[in-house]
Image (cartoon, rainbow, N blue to C red):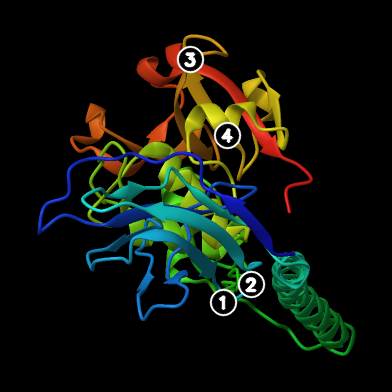
């Protein structure tokens, strides 16, 4: 569907030679996620710009005075049209431009999510079957040895058999070495679980990639990121789900099924912190055994701030904990 509308919000300031004539930010309509590499074109001119990694664009060139039609497009989104009125000596700042995801793109995202979940279940099942097969082979071998020994004892007749003492006669356990990713080993140790129980390897590879990124309020990239931008990027990359930009909006979302019991927390749940429901000021993602990952300005016991794994039983986080939240029906 294509839309044609007038941008009602303009901010006019005196224009200098080095000023930008026209600036704005492009967001995804439903999730308000910033859209990178969207094409912004002023129709009837040779003027065009791409949005940066936080969805912003800027035209430095002179734009013809009068009403101009602007188009914003990107693959996977419906093209949007709107009109700006250009006046001499003034610049235009658009509050936000929202693009709607196409039906085909929405369908593709749902399909990709299902495929990832299916693949994760398949890998988990294969690992379980491999471990069970190794155990069964070991049991069968022990039974065979016991049977052979019994046959020899029955055939010994009058032959006197003596046995020299052996220091250790116990059957040695055959080590089972499943195909374990180094990331599984590392984060299993941090979370206090078995490596084979770390199934969502993509989640922990994402955490590994972002750990140590500095905390910057309003940041949204490797140079600096804040808590809600980090959870937003994690859900986008790992779960192929687009969630809101601020901790308060993520908490208030109709797709967040909130609960207060910590005992119900599961891997991938959002965890919110704040004084009350109207003042949610921090968010992270729960992992296992009271551990959660987040971007924080607090140094704490780890001696560093930024993206890191913290413990929910720490007094600072325990006292500020408000609720957990599961994302449901979020496509």
Q: CA distance from mark 4 to mark 3?
A: 12 Å
Against 102, residue 269 (above or below) is above
- Closer to the chain start, of discs 4 and 3, is 4
Q: Secondary structure at mark 3?
A: loop
Pointer 3 residue: 279
- Closer to the chain start, of discs 3 and 2, is 2
Pointer 4 residue: 250
x 61%, y 44%: residue: 267
Q: CA distance from mark 1 to mark 3?
A: 45 Å
Q: How many marks?
A: 4
- Closer to the chain start, of discs 4 and 1, is 1
- Closer to the chain start, of discs 1 and 2, is 2
Q: Position of residue 315 (x, y in %)?
A: 38, 15
Against 229, residue 241 (above or below) is below
Q: CA distance from mark 4 to mark 1?
A: 37 Å
Pointer 4 with pointer 1, Cβ within 8 A: no
- The circle drawn on residue 179 is 1
**Nearest the eye: 41 or 155:** 41
x 55%, y 57%: residue: 82
Q: Quadrant of residue 210?
A: bottom left
- The circle drawn on residue 76 is 2
What quarter of the picture does the C terminus occupy? bottom right
Q: Secondary structure at mark 4?
A: helix
């Amino acid at each position: 569907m294509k839309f044609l509308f007038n941008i009602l919000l303009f901010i006019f300031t005196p224009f200098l030679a080095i000023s930008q004539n026209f600036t704005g930010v492009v967001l995804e309509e439903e999730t308000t996620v910033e859209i990178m590499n969207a094409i912004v074109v002023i129709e009837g001119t040779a003027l065009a710009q791409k949005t940066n990694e936080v969805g912003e664009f800027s035209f430095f060139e002179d734009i013809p005075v009068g009403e101009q039609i602007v188009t914003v497009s990107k693959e996977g989104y419906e093209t949007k049209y709107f009109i700006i009125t250009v006046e001499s000596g003034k610049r235009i700042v658009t509050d936000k431009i929202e693009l709607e995801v196409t039906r085909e793109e929405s369908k593709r995202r749902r399909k990709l999510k299902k495929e990832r979940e299916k693949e994760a279940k398949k890998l988990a099942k294969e690992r379980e079957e491999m471990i069970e097969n190794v155990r069964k082979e070991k049991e069968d071998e022990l039974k065979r040895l016991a049977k052979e020994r019994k046959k020899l004892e029955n055939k010994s007749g009058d032959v006197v058999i003596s046995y020299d003492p052996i220091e250790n006669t116990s059957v040695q356990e055959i080590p089972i070495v499943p195909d374990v990713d180094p990331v599984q080993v590392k984060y299993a140790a941090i979370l206090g679980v078995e490596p084979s129980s770390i199934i969502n390897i993509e989640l922990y590879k994402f955490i590994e990639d972002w750990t140590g990124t500095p905390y910057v309020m309003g940041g949204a990239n490797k140079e600096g990121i804040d808590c809600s931008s980090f959870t937003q990027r994690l859900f986008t990359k790992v779960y192929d789900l687009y969630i809101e930009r601020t901790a308060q909006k993520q908490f208030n979302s109709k797709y967040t099924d909130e609960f207060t019991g910590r005992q119900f927390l599961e891997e991938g749940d959002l965890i919110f912190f704040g004084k009350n429901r109207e003042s949610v000021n921090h968010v992270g993602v729960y992992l296992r055994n009271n551990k959660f990952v987040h971007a924080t300005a607090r140094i704490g016991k780890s001696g560093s701030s930024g993206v890191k794994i913290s413990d929910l039983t720490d007094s600072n986080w325990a006292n500020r904990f408000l609720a957990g939240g599961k994302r449901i029906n979020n496509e």
